[in-house]
Image (cartoon, helix red, strand yellow):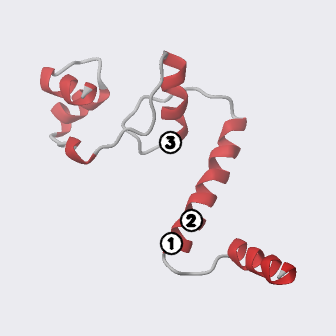
């Protein structure tokens, strides 16, 4: 809602509105999803920084560098889950299956 409103109003403080006006790109707000909710600014900015990368439309949020290692680890885990959902056995699944067979 917030992003849709600032684009409609042409808010110059919004990078999304500015990008839309300058580049003519249209965002498909019907396909967006709320990933998390927060009660304060820090609570909103940390998850946003966590999922944003260099291709993000969001302004950069400075977070301590050690969080980037956690983010990289999470991206590897997410990729592993995507691969496993496609029916391919991952290294982690193979180990878990081997442990299960040992205990059975």
Side of 72 where 53 appears, left or right: left
Task: Please tell me which residue lies in front, 86 or 12.
Answer: 86
Q: What residue is shown at x 52% (from left), y 80% (from top)?
A: 87
Task: Please tell me which residue lies in front, 32 or 55.
Answer: 32
From this viewpoint, which residue is outermost toward the front? 104
Task: Please tell me which residue lies in front, 40 or 58.
Answer: 40
From this viewpoint, which residue is outermost toward the right? 102
Which of the two discs, 2 and 3, labels the residue nearer the N terminus? 3
Which of the two discs, 1 and 3, labels the residue nearer the N terminus? 3
Q: Are marks 1 and 3 in contact (CB under 8 Å)?
A: no
Measure how far apart labels 1 and 2 are at the Cα level: 6 Å
Q: Quadrant of residue 70?
A: top right
| Residue 27 showing in the rendered view | no
| Residue 103 showing in the rendered view | yes
Residue 8 place in picture, x, y as percent: 13, 26
Image depth: mark 1 or mark 3 in front: 1
Q: What residue is shown at x 72% (from left), y 36% (from top)?
A: 66
Measure how far apart labels 2 and 3 are at the Cα level: 17 Å
Tag 1's secondary structure? helix
Up/down of 58 relative to 97, above or below? above
Say which mark, if any, is on residue 51: 3
Badge 1: few (under 14), some or many (20 or more) residues near its Cα, within 10 Å?
A: few
The residue singled out by tag 1 in the image is 85
Measure how far apart labels 1 and 3 are at the Cα level: 21 Å
Up/down of 75 relative to 104, above or below? above
Residue 92 place in picture, x, y as percent: 71, 71
Badge 2: few (under 14), some or many (20 or more) residues near its Cα, within 10 Å?
A: some
Q: Are marks 1 and 2 in contact (CB under 8 Å)?
A: yes
Tag 2's secondary structure? helix
Tag 3's secondary structure? helix
């Amino acid at each position: 809602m917030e992003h849709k409103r600032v684009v409609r109003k042409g808010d110059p403080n919004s990078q999304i509105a500015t990008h839309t006006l300058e580049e003519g790109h249209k965002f498909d707000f019907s396909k967006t999803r709320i990933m998390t909710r927060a009660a304060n600014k820090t609570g909103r900015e940390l998850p946003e920084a966590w999922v944003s990368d260099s291709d993000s439309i969001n302004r950069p949020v400075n977070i301590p560098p050690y969080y980037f290692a956690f983010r990289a680890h999470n991206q590897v885990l997410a990729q592993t889950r995507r691969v496993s959902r496609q029916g391919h056995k991952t290294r982690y699944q193979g180990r878990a299956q081997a442990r299960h067979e040992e205990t059975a």
